[in-house]
Amino acid sequence: MDHSPCLKLFKATVIAVVFFFRAFLAIFAMVYRPSTMDNKNLTWKKLSSHYIHKGPWATLRSDRCEMPNGHIVEDYYVLEYSNWVNAVAITEDNKILMVHQYRHAAGIVSLEIPGGVIDEGETPEQGLRRELLEETGYLFDDFEPLCTVYGNPSTANNQTYCFLARGGKKVQEQHLDEQEEIIVETFTIPQVKQLLLDNKIAQALHCTGLFYALNKLGAL
């Protein structure tokens, strides 16, 4: 019995399978090929740096940098700030603490969540507990980290730590700095959601913290 037709069919099938398998691999390689420019390759190299101004609240420096393609960037200005911390602070009767204060750079009275600068030697949680007590008179001991974000990573180097604080109790009056005038107000969770929808909270970092907190609380 002549098996040659079967052998020819078998060989043709094998060739076809190999062909399609190679084609599949080629397509897969093109679609899923990793980028030649990964995150590490995007990083600039700082060649030199000098300070233009040093102050208690902000410091300005100028960097000379080299990009991955060899291009030299002259005088890239960076603002150095201390790190900040804020909280979506919920009182023991389930109200969110908000503060009204004047923001001179924007020329507005801003509705915000409480927070401030982390002092040297403090952890973010320690700084937050102090700021909440000073700004609102409420004492909190239950803190849950929500996120760590940059206000403007293009020009500023500091981070903001956002927390969810719960169970706050009013234990004292405010203890404010000389340049601070702060009005404290409490809102329900639905009221805060509406404030966000109505664009009544102008501080972008605080909107971010509120988003993470509402998500954590299942209130979005």
Image (spheres, helix red, strand yellow):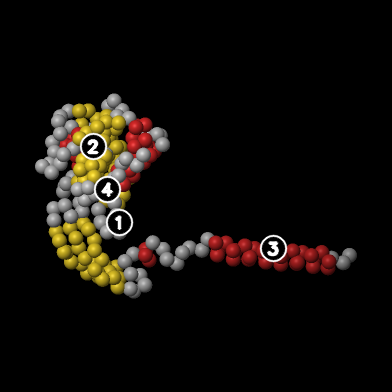
State whether residue 211 is above or below residue 73. above
Q: Nearer the viewer, residue 77 or 130?
A: 77
Select label 1 or label 2 by which is in front: 2
First in sequence: mark 1 vs mark 2: 2
Select label 2 or label 4 by which is in front: 2
Q: Can residue 90 be spotted in the picture?
A: no
Q: Quadrant of the N terminus?
A: bottom right
Q: Position of residue 184 (x, y in %)?
A: 22, 33
Select label 1 or label 3 by which is in front: 1
Q: Residue at x 31, y 41 (%)?
A: 201
First in sequence: mark 3 vs mark 2: 3
First in sequence: mark 4 vs mark 3: 3
Q: Nearer the viewer, residue 190 or 114?
A: 190
The answer to whether the residue labelled 3 contacts the one labelled 2, judged by CB atoms less than 8 Å apart, is: no
Which residue type does callout 2 highlight? Val
Q: CA distance from mark 3 to mark 2?
A: 69 Å
Q: Quadrant of the C terminus?
A: top left
The residue that disc 1 covers is 153
Q: CA distance from mark 4 to mark 3?
A: 57 Å
Q: Can residue 41 be spotted in the picture?
A: yes
The answer to whether the residue labelled 4 contacts the one labelled 3, judged by CB atoms less than 8 Å apart, is: no
Q: Residue at x 21, y 65 (%)?
A: 62
Q: Secondary structure at mark 4?
A: strand
First in sequence: mark 1 vs mark 3: 3
Residue 160, labelled with which disc? Answer: 4
Q: CA distance from mark 1 to mark 2?
A: 26 Å
Which residue type does callout 1 highlight? Pro
Q: CA distance from mark 1 to mark 4?
A: 11 Å
Q: Secondary structure at mark 2?
A: strand
Select label 4 or label 3 by which is in front: 4
